[in-house]
Amino acid sequence: MQSVMRTLLCAAAAITVSLLTACGSGSGTTAPATIRVVNDTASPNVTLSLNGLATVSAAAQATSGYVSVTPSTYTLSVATQTGLTGAATSVGLGTAQNYTALAYERGNNIYSAVYSDNQAIPSTGFSSLDVANVSTDAGPLDVYLVPHSTGTPSLTGYQPTFSSVQGLSTATTLASTAPASGSTAAIAWDIVVTRAAAPNDVRLTLSNPNFVSAQPYTLVLTATAGGGLVNSVLIPQGLTTAVFTPSSQARVRVWSVLPVSPGTPVSVQVGTTALTVANAPSPTPYQLVPAQSTVTAIALGSTPIATLPAGTFAAGGDYTILVYGTGGPTGTPAALILTDTNQVVANYASVRLINAAVTNSGGLTMYVANAEGASSVTYPTASTGTSAYIYTGVKPASAAPIDLIGAGYTGAQSTGQFTSGSVYTAMVYDATLPPLIVQDR
């Protein structure tokens, strides 16, 4: 079943996503609108305000009841008990219409997403579901509903139930998990979320969510710290029993710079998961690993690396395992875990630098489109765990030069092709060559 996107009719502020499907007030009637707030933050309390007046609140990971308000256009904002306040936005609440406002976190900010909560009640034995993707970092997403599996769900032979979702999809009907006696047979489902048109790039799996007979639901997908994966909230229309499911996985890739020629494959194991073999100087694709897992083995060819990088992979995070030489590119092979931030910046491209070649104490300074984006990026060392990532926001251009300055670096200027809302890494793996530019998001 293919998803048809609803047109977004209401404008949104920079950090507020509006998914309203009905705007403005009614005419000739006083039937109220209703609105509620769902708190998908770590704050003990979130308050929804309309025109600056506190209207309704919800505890952490909880859903308020609906409150009635006069149909009108309002300035809506959300604020946490811990002091975060989202930007205000104008929303129209229509006559006799119901709305849900989700409060969620991204980085150190709070955001709100408001959607119309007026799905038709499905027949006995069926549920209905629509999807709201409010993670701008993950990009367009496909959502599959497949029969429940006790192992990893297979998408082979299935088409997305919702395709390329950005914003709010239309609803679809499905057999409920436990329909009434004598109606359509019950079915257990798994929900698998992938990057659009990339079924092998899984961003979230929900195992056997409970869909009650004659009940509409909205599945909201929100941002994670790394940016690639998503968290979810399954919100039943009219009920306060939302199910909050944060990501239980992390994404990890391997980037080897040892040696480039002749190439020697690098194998890495995280927990019991063998990652894709890496060959310098290109990174492997990100792969899923269980949250809180650790690196259990690394080998350069058939030779194990004795000292493994410490640390665990946090849920929802993106990481790079960098394999390099201690003290310089020809030194003893070592590995370092770098935390990737693949969250995007609207109207900008983000560029980061890894210095895996230049060992002078002053490191490298990077200029992107003639503006300084990073300074004193030193050679990474496993003993200190120094992160080599520096980010700079640049307006995209058809061809933007990258200049690197540092004692001992003789590589030529490189040119990047940057796109808004993307994240790039400039990898310096050889002091005599221009950086390798990789688009990560």
Image (cartoon, helix red, strand yellow):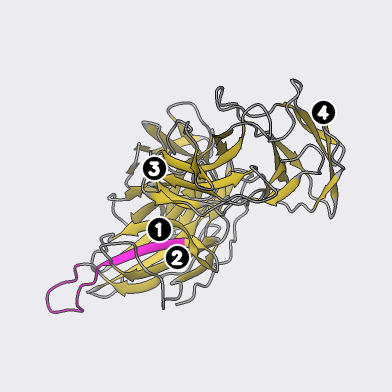
Tell me which numbered mark, 1 or 4, is placed earlier along the sequence: 1
Tell me which numbered mark, 2 or 3, is placed earlier along the sequence: 2
Image location (x, y in percent) of residue 106: 52, 40
Q: Quadrant of residue 80?
A: top left
Q: Which amino acid does label 2 sit on?
A: Val
Q: Can residue 23 be seen in this view?
A: yes
Q: Which of marks 1 and 4 is in front?
A: 4
> Disc 1 and disc 3: Cα gap in Å?
22 Å
Tell me which numbered mark, 4 or 2, is placed earlier along the sequence: 2
**For residue 139, above or below residue 65:** below
Name the element at disc 1.
strand
Answer whether labels 3 and 4 touch (C-beta < 8 Å).
no
**For residue 353, above or below residue 282:** above
Residue wearing tag 1: 219
Answer whether labels 1 and 3 touch (C-beta < 8 Å).
no
Q: Which amino acid does label 3 sit on?
A: Ala
Q: Quadrant of residue 390?
A: top right
> Disc 1 and disc 4: Cα gap in Å?
49 Å
For residue 291, the mark is 3
376 part of magenta stretch: no
> Disc 2 and disc 3: Cα gap in Å?
22 Å
Q: Which of marks 3 and 4 is in front?
A: 4
Q: Residue at x 36, y 31 (%)?
A: 44
Q: Which of marks 1 and 3 is in front?
A: 3
Residue lying furthest left: 181
Image location (x, y in percent) of residue 284: 57, 53
> Disc 2 and disc 1: Cα gap in Å?
10 Å
